[in-house]
Amino acid sequence: PPGVRHGVVYKPDEPKEYLVMVYAIHRSAESPGRRQPGLEYVDRVERALSGRLYLIARDAGGCRHLLPEIRREVNDKQPGWQLALEDYCRLFFVRLMRNVLGAGAPEAETGQANLAVEITKYMHAHYHENISLEDVSKAFHITPRHVTRIFSDYFGTSFRKTLSIYRLNYAKNYLCYTDKSAEEIASLVGISAVQTLYRLFKENEGITISEYRKYHRKT
């Protein structure tokens, strides 16, 4: 979203945690006058999400504060943890839906945001190739100027810089998990000259490639 630093910026030696919550809404067969409490609320949420591939919303509902509690119940499994987990997940869902209703993103912005996401997905799929701004513009049938404006508006950076950061982070994984040389890695991540990879490491990490590999090496 606008104002948020973009890119796959991470340290390969840090463990990653992913949380996926899947909710299914079961419709009641009862008459409209006897609908279950909250279904009108769910209807509002469904209308807010209609026609959208995704929605960016501020966590005004405080969902993030429930995650440590959910993690604790799952990990500790104290007596009654299933009941507590069910309550936490239900509350998480309610607060998540409040975030959805409070987002209010204009439809025009949503279309542009979808395009921005699709462009970055294209870059992740082709980062190892010699892709350019013109290649991206042709793939999405828009002008290079439009691509540049999207990166400036949504990510606060340029296409070229974003692509360099992508390639740098993929190179980090090769350094940590393989014995490949710097020259091989540069070629694998779409960098034509190994000197460019050396420069990217020095500018972004403040250390050399060999120093990075020695510090983060996985055995």
Image: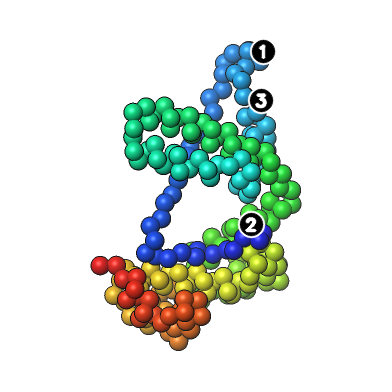
Q: Foreground: 46 or 74? A: 74
CA gap, disc 2 and disc 3: 29 Å
> How many other residues sit within 10 Å of disc 2, few (<14), some (14-19) or many (≥20)?
some
Q: Position of residue 18 (x, y in %)?
A: 43, 49
Q: Position of residue 140 (x, y in %)?
A: 63, 63
Q: On the picture, is 3 further left or further right than 106?
A: left
Disc number for residue 33: 1
Q: Quadrant of residue 96?
A: top right
The answer to whether marks 1 and 3 mark residues whose Cβ atoms lie closer than 8 Å is no
Task: Specify which label sits upstream in the sequence, 1 or 2.
Answer: 2
Q: Foreground: 140 or 76? A: 76
Rendered position, 180 above or below 48: below
Q: Position of residue 59 (x, y in %)?
A: 61, 45
Q: Which residue lies at the image location 42% right of the left edge and 65% below the top edge?
A: 11
Q: Say which quadrant the N terminus sits in.
A: bottom right
Q: Which residue lies at the image location 62% right of the left edge and 60% below the top edge?
A: 4
**Count of numbered circles in the view:** 3
Q: Position of residue 29 (x, y in %)?
A: 57, 16
* Secondary structure under the numbered disc 3 in the rendered image: helix
Rendered position, 140 above or below 208: above
> Which residue does the numbered mark 3 point to in the structure image?
40
> Which residue does the numbered mark 2 point to in the structure image?
1
Q: Quadrant of residue 132?
A: bottom right
Q: Amino acid at mark 1?
A: Gly
Q: Amino acid at mark 3?
A: Glu
Q: Say which quadrant the C terminus sits in.
A: bottom left
Task: Specify which label sits upstream in the sequence, 2 or 3.
Answer: 2
Q: Foreground: 75 or 197? A: 75
> How many other residues sit within 10 Å of disc 1, few (<14), some (14-19) or many (≥20)?
few
Whether residue 158 is visible to the viewer of this picture, yes or no, is yes
* Secondary structure under the numbered disc 2 in the rendered image: loop
